[in-house]
Amino acid sequence: MAVVVHQVARPQGWPSADQFASVEIPAPVPGPGQALVENLYLSVDPYMRERMDFEKLGVPMEGRALGRVVESRDPRLAAGDVVFHRQGWRSHAVVAPEETRVVREEPGVPLTAYLSVLGGTGLSAYVGLTRIARLSPGETVGDRHEPVPARIDNTTGHVLGGPASG
């Protein structure tokens, strides 16, 4: 068996557990050119809250995930590979290689980093500093004598805050 998480009601303000349901389904089976991934980590990101207002109810939640390939019917993905994909909130996902990115496990780097500082969050912070603020190596936001937001509340802001302040 596998489990998928469905949104079953629209939140008014903060989401709560009663607006979601865990649904057991038969374990998915990969076809030719696909692999079965057992998810290890699911990402909960700020953009998801807005989507909860208009996405279809009663279907698996969209989202980023990291999982380990448990069965493969494609030579580009091997059993044991850790992959990043966007099949959402589910215990198992069937993916095609072009829908994934193989994540290389590095000593001392937790896999969760690939859903945060080494993923979209880190990329957003990097682009903000290098392409929008156009900081040079060694330069900090404080060097610019420009206003800096008094608070940075989102995840990208926390990743950005350290390098930006020197």
Image (tube, helix red, strand yellow):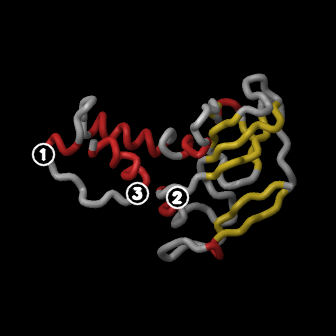
Q: Which residue is mark 2?
A: 48
x%, y% of residue 10?
57, 72
Q: Earlier in the sequence, mark 1 or mark 3?
A: 1
Tell me whether the residue at label 2 lies in contact with that at label 1, contact meaning CB atoms closer than 8 angstroms: no
Mark 1 residue type:
His
Q: Which residue is mark 1?
A: 145
Label 3 environment density (alpha carbons within 10 Å; few <14, some 14–19, many ≥20): few
Mark 3 residue type:
Asn
Q: Secondary structure at mark 2?
A: helix
What is the spatial separation of the Cα atoms under label 3 and label 2, in whole angstroms?
13 Å
Residue 13 in the image: above or below residue 1: below
Q: Secondary structure at mark 1?
A: loop
Which quarter of the figure has residue 71?
top right
What is the spatial separation of the Cα atoms under label 1 and label 3, in whole angstroms?
23 Å
In the image, taking residue 16 as reference, residue 155 lies left or right, namely left
Residue 39 in the image: above or below residue 6: above
x%, y% of residue 52?
54, 64
139 and 98: which is toward the camera:
139
Q: Secondary structure at mark 3?
A: loop
Determine the residue positioned at 40% across, 47% down. 159
Q: Which residue is mark 3?
A: 154
Q: Nearer the viewer, mark 3 or mark 2?
A: 3
Residue 64 in the image: above or below residue 47: above
